[in-house]
Image (cartoon, helix red, strand yellow):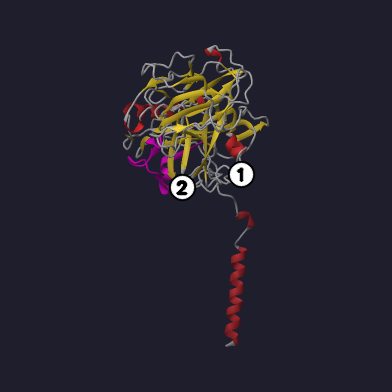
Amino acid sequence: MKTIQLTKVVVAVLALLTITSCVNDDDFSLPNLTIEEPQIDGEVISVAALRNLFLQEGETVDLTESTAYVEGYVVSSDESGNWFEELIIQDSPSNPTAGLRVLIDNSPLFTTYEVGRKIFVKLGGLHVGDSNGVLTLGITSNLEKIPAPLQFDFVERSTEVAEIIPLEVSISDFSEDLENVLVSLTDVQFAKDEVIDASLTFAGEPLDQFDGERTLIACANNQTVILATSTFADFKSIALPVERGTVTGVLTRNFFGDTFNLVLNDLDGISFDNTERCDPVEIDCGVADSAGAQVLFEDFFETQSTNQPISGNGWTNFVQEGTQAWEAYTSGGTNASLGISANVGSFMSGDDSSIAWLVTPQINFDGQDGETLQFQTSNSFSDGSTLELLFSSDWDGTPENIPTASWDVLPAAVLVQDDDFFGDWIPSGIVDLSCIEGAGYIGFRYIGSGDSDFDGTYELDEIQINAQ
C-alpha cells in the first residue's frame, strides 16, 4: 500500500514538472489591440444629412432597409458617470453643424469610444427620431437602446481620433441646430443664490433625485441656462465654484424635452479663473409697514388699448432682443386679468432670444420722504423665462441705451414664480425705496429662455409709487 501511494506522488510530481516546463514566459503577450480602418460597405452620410431627413419627414423615420452608415465624432464620455448608455456624436471636430445621440445598452462606453473617435453607425435596422427633444438613433420606432450583444454589429470605429474644438457660442445662440454639439460658454457664473446665499454641490443635495439642476448666468446679458448633472456622476458632491469663467459641455434638453440643458463630460469642462463675480448690485431698503398718501406714479393700465404695446404715462417699452414687447391684454376665466393688465412673453414667437423692458418715468427720490413701491404679478406657465425688478440711476432716458446702463436689483419685492398657480395674482408687498438718493428709473425686465415653443408669459398690474 505504501509503495502504491509513493508511486502516485512521484507520478504527480513528474506531471507537474512536465506541465511547468511546457510554459515559456516569452509566450505571454498582450492581445492585438490595433484598430484597422473599417471597410464600409454602403453609402456614408453625415449627421447633418440624417437630421435633414428627419426634419423632412417630421416624425420618427424607419431606417430598417437602409444600407447607409452615418459618420461622426464622439463628443461625450461616461468615464465620470455623467452620461449613461448613450453616445453623442457630431459631424465635425470643429465648427459642427449637427449632432446625434446614439443609444447603446452598454456601460461604460468611453473605453471603446473615447472623445474625438470617429465612428460609423450602420443605419439598417435602426430608427431616427426625437427623444427628449433631441435627435436620437435607436432600435424600433420607440427608439430603444441597441442591445449590447449587437453593439459592434452597428458601430464601427475608425482609426481617426480627432481633437474636438468646442463651438464657442452664447446662450442666445442656442437652437435645435446646436443640440448634441459640444459647445463652450465664456464669462458665465453660477447663480448667486446657489453659491453665495447657499453652498450647493453639482448634484449632491437631498432634493436632487435624478439630476442636479444648477443655473448658469451669462455676465454679458444675464441670460441663463441649466447645467444638469447626474446624481451618479463621480463629481456630484463637489461644491459649485464661486468664480466665473468658461463652461464646456454638450447642449441637450432636460428629461421632458422642453428646455435646453448643458451637460459636462467631467469637471475639466469647468474653467472658472476670474474671482470677480458679475452679480448686480442690490438696493435693499427692506419692506415698509405702510404706503404714504402722496402718489408719485401709478398705472392700472385701464386706459391702454388691448393687444397693443404699452404706451403713454411716461412708460418706456423697449425690445432689446426678439420681437415681443409689453402689451395690454384682458382675459377672464381661470387666468383672469385685473381688468386690463400688461403682458409679455415669447411663447410661439419664433424668437431665439427675447428681452423686453418696461421702464417707469424718472422718479426724484430727494423731493419727499418715505417712498414705496407696490404692484402685482401673475404668470401663464412662465417656465424658463424670468422677470426682474431693477433700478437705474444712470440711464439717460434713451431707449437704445437701456442695455448699457447700470441696473441694480430691488430684492425686497415679491415676484411671481413659475411654480405659483397661474390663476393667482401675487402682491409685491410694500417695497421700501426710502434709502435711494437722487433720481432714477424702475424697470421690469423680461428674459426668455431662448425656447419660444416653451416659454410662457408674465402679467403685471396695479403699480403704485407713493411717498409720505
Q: Residue 358 versus residue 66: which sits nearer the camera?
A: 358
Q: Is residue 24 left or right of residue 360?
A: right
Q: Residue 362 versus residue 26: which sits nearer the camera?
A: 362
Q: Residue 423 versus residue 36: which sits nearer the camera?
A: 423
Identify which amino acid the numbered label 1 is placed on: Ile
Q: Can you give x and y, in whole percent of width and height, for residue 234 in the image?
A: 57, 46
Residue 432 appears in the rendering? yes
Q: Residues under labels 1 and 2: Cα distance?
A: 27 Å
Identify which amino acid the numbered label 2 is placed on: Asn
Residue 159: mark in rendering:
none
Mark 2 is surrounded, within 10 Å at the Cα level, by few (under 14), some (14 to 19) or many (20 or more) other residues, namely some
Q: Can you give x and y, in whole percent of width and height, for residue 389 in the image?
A: 53, 26
Q: Which residues are magenta?
A: 130-159
Residue 165 appears in the rendering? no
> Residue 322's image quarter?
top left
Residue 106: mark in rendering:
2
Which image quadrant: the N terminus? bottom right
> Residue 114's image quarter?
top right
> Residue 190's image quarter?
top right
Q: Residue 189 versus residue 368: which sits nearer the camera?
A: 368
Q: Is residue 305 left or right of residue 395?
A: left
The residue at which mark 1 appears reads as 238
